[in-house]
Image (cartoon, rainbow, N blue to C red):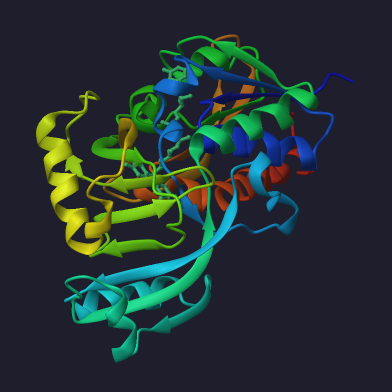
Amino acid sequence: MNKTRVAVVGAGVSGCSCALALIEQYPNVDVTVFADRPFTDTTSFGPPGIFALDYQQYNVGASSGVQLISGYILSDNEQLLKEEEENMSDIVFNFQWLKPKDFQLFANPPKYGIFFTTFTTEGRTYVPWLTSRLKERKVKFEQRTIAKLNELGNTFDFVINCAGVDAGKIAGDDDTVVPARGVLLEVAAPGQKHFISLDIGTALIPTTKSFFIGTLKQMGRSDRVVTQQDRDEIWERNLKIMPTLKNAKVMSEWAGLRPVRKEGIRLEMKDNIAANGKRYYIVHNYGHGSNGFTLSWGCAKEVVELIGGQLHHPNSKI
Ligand SMILES: Cc1cc2nc3c(=O)[nH]c(=O)nc-3n(C[C@H](O)[C@H](O)[C@H](O)COP(=O)(O)OP(=O)(O)OC[C@H]3O[C@@H](n4cnc5c(N)ncnc54)[C@H](O)[C@@H]3O)c2cc1C
């Protein structure tokens, strides 16, 4: 019997997570991952992605870049923090509101603060770690630009769209993804172990070897060169909460594009007929905006469920 063939378009955190979740569930499926550019040019390369893991088996420390950290979100806007509490207090660990004494820890403390423990990783370590797991399982990688997903329909039974900011363009049904430009500076700050965020947008996040400070959120901008204006704005905001970083050495800087979709994440399956008359399915998985790392594994498991639903369907033609 012929093997089920799956194409994943995108080798960022979304595409690699889908490929791994799929091959773990269905080891006999034949998977090819397509990417049109080197990994260093994708959004998933840069972030020190703060996220929660569903599976303890992936909490493997330095080799995946994943680590458990604690930290603070500070704000004068109590409502903003109440929303954070509603969004994630039952997902993260040790969630608590700061007590008056805790504010002594900060220069220029705002009025309100929350503390919690979560996972973080570096995209540049975590995604290559996923890629290694995929190569061990004989998943193929191909550098190729896919103009429209339907060009893969003649050959593949399932085509998973994880193309980040370009996913709407290649979907072929006029969907739109808007880039939201962000910038991060990687600095050496030994001894700094907690993340600190001010009003969400200003953040200091430790990773296994260094510390990232950011960021910006510029909707509709897709240039990726870091400017002096970017640097000045990021330093000004971060030094307010952590003046001791003043002389910290900058090790690298990076601009990336969050894939934002007005309607939120697109996670759905569509039935299609290819040019050669073959039936195939497109599974869209994109539009994760600022939370692509957080959501990557959960979305990948949903993609596998959608595909599994077709594979096990009594009338399946696959
Ligand atoms: C400054 C910043 C900070 C962030 N911080 C966090 C954080 O702390 N936590 C968190 O969860 N998220 C964070 N994010 C968001 C996260 O980085 C993104 O949501 C995530 O990386 C998107 O991953 P992706 O795999 O969907 O897309 P990408 O990483 O953009 O990958 C897209 C892939 O599609 C391929 N592709 C595109 N078009 C084509 C085509 N036509 N043909 C073939 N291949 C194609 C590309 O080559 C690439 O491999 C941050 C983002 C930024 C910019």
- Most extreme residue toward the left is 229
**Horizontal side of residue 89 vs 140, given as left or right:** left
Residue at the spot 52% in from the left edge and 38% down from the top edge: 14
**Position of residue 294 measured from the top left corner of the image (x, y, whole percent):** 49, 53
Specify whether residue 270 is in view. Answer: no
**Position of residue 231 measured from the top left corner of the image (x, y, whole percent):** 17, 37
Name above or below for residue 121 compared with residue 12: below
**Horizontal side of residue 126 vs 39, given as left or right:** right
The picture quadrant for ligand 1 comes to top left
- Most extreme residue toward the right is 1
**Horizontal side of residue 134 vs 101, given as left or right:** right
Label count reads 0
Q: Which picture quadrant has residue 55?
A: bottom right
Q: Which picture quadrant has residue 253?
A: top left
**Position of residue 152 measured from the top left corner of the image (x, y, whole percent):** 56, 15
Residue at the spot 39% in from the left edge and 29% down from the top edge: 167
Name above or below for residue 121 compared with residue 8: below
Q: Which picture quadrant has residue 53?
A: bottom right
Name above or below for residue 130 compared with residue 156: below
Query: Considering depth in this image, is 142 or 174 the residue closer to the camera?
Result: 142
Specify whether residue 266 is in view. Answer: yes
**Horizontal side of residue 127 vs 136, given as left or right:** left
- The quarter of the image holding the C terminus is top right
**Position of residue 162 measured from the top left corner of the image (x, y, whole percent):** 49, 32
Residue at the spot 42% in from the left edge and 67% down from the top edge: 71
